[in-house]
Amino acid sequence: MRIRLRAISQRAEELAIFDQPGTWVAGQVGRLIKEGPAKDLLSGTWLGHPLHPMLTDVPIGAWSSALVLDLFGGKESRRAAEMMVGVGLVAAMPTAAAGLTDFSDTFGAQRRVGTVHAAFNTVALGLYAASWLARRRGRHSAGVALGLGGAVAVTGGGFLGGHLSYGMGVGVDHTAFDQEPSDWTPVVDEAQLAEGQLTLAEVGNVPLLLLRRDGRILAVADTCTHRGGPLHQGELEDGTVVVCPWHRSAFRMEDGEVVRGPATARQPAYETRVIDGTVEVRVREPSA
C-alpha cells in the first residue's frame, strides 16, 4: 500500500496537463492577493509558521466528527452531525484562502501536485455543501452518502497535502538542515566586499550573503527560508533589507528577521569579525 500511494503522488508530479490550469489559478490569486498585509496574514508571516496547515485541522476535525456521528451516533445525533458539516464548510473558507496563497508561490512539480490537491478539496467542499443542504431538507440518507463521498475526497486531498509538505518541502524552512558554524570560520577577504553591494560567499557547504554597510559587515544565509530563492540575486531596500527575487520576502540583514512575507521563518544570521584582512563568521543565536 505504501508503494502504491507513493506511486500516486509521483504520478501527480508528472501530470503536465495541470500546468496550464495551475498557472492560471496561481496568476489569479497573485492578482487578487498582492504583496503586503493580506498576503502576510494568509501566509502566516505574523505567526512565524505557515497558516494553512494549522487551519486544516478545523474542517477536517469537524467533518471527521460528522462521519463518526453518522456511522455510530444514531438518530439523536443527526442534528449534531449536520452542525459539524456546517462548521467544516465555514472553516474551509479561510483554510482555502490560505492554501491558495501558498499555492501561488509554487512552481513545476509542486504546482502540479498542488493543483490535484486543490481539485480533491474542491470536490470535497462541493459534496459537503450538498450533504448539508440534503440534511437541512430532511434527506438524511442522501446527506450521509454525500458526506461519505466528501470524506473520501478530503482524505485524498490530505494525502497530497502531506506529500507537498513532507515530500516536496512546501512550507518547510529551506535552511533548517544547514550545518552552520558555531565557531569563527574564515569566509572571504575583506577587500572583496564593496560598500553597499550584496556578496555571495560560502561557509562549509552553506551559501552566505554578505553586505558591507557603514563600517559594518552583515551576514545571513543566502538561501531564502520561504522557497529556497537565492537572496544574492535580490535587491536592497532601506540600505540593509534584502528582498528575495522569487517571491519578494524581505529580511533584515542585521538579524535575519522577516520584514515582509510571504516568508514565515527568519534567515539564519551570522556574527562577523575581520582578522588580518579576512572576514570570519559564526552563527548568531536569535535573541529571546
Image: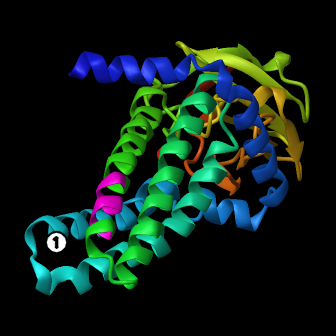
Residue 11's place in the image compared with 162, above or below, is: above
Whether the magenta-drawn stretch holds residue 147 is answered as: yes
Residue at horizontal 83%, vertical 33%?
A: 234
Residue at horizontal 39%, vertical 84%?
A: 136
The quadrant where residue 166 appears = top left
x%, y% of residue 167? Answer: 41, 27
Residue 19's place in the image compared with 249, above or below, is: above
Q: Which residue is mark 1?
A: 69
Residue at horizontal 25%, vertical 86%?
A: 79
x%, y% of residue 247? Answer: 75, 41
x%, y% of residue 223? Answer: 64, 29
Quadrant the N terminus occupies: top left
Whether the magenta-drawn stretch holds residue 59 is answered as: no
Q: How many marks are shown on the rendered structure?
A: 1
Asked whether residue 49 appears in the rendered view, the answer is: no
- Crowd tier of the residue under label 1, counting other residues whose Cα lies within 10 Å: few below 14, some 14–19, many 20 or above: many
Asked whether residue 216 appears in the rendered view, the answer is: yes
Looking at the rendered structure, the kind of residue marked 1 is Leu
x%, y% of residue 131? Answer: 39, 68
In the image, taking residue 221 as reference, residue 182 lies left or right, namely: left
80 and 108: which one is in front? Answer: 80
Residue at horizontal 81%, vertical 59%?
A: 32
113 and 219: which one is in front? Answer: 113
Residue 160's place in the image compared with 108, above or below, is: below
What secondary structure is the magenta-colored segment mainly?
helix
Query: Residues in magenta?
Result: 143-149
214 and 219: which one is in front? Answer: 219
185 and 54: which one is in front? Answer: 54
Quadrant the C terminus occupies: bottom left
In the image, taking residue 210 as reference, residue 93 lies left or right, namely: left
In the image, taking residue 177 as reference, residue 65 lies left or right, namely: left
- How does the figure colour the protein chain or chains? rainbow
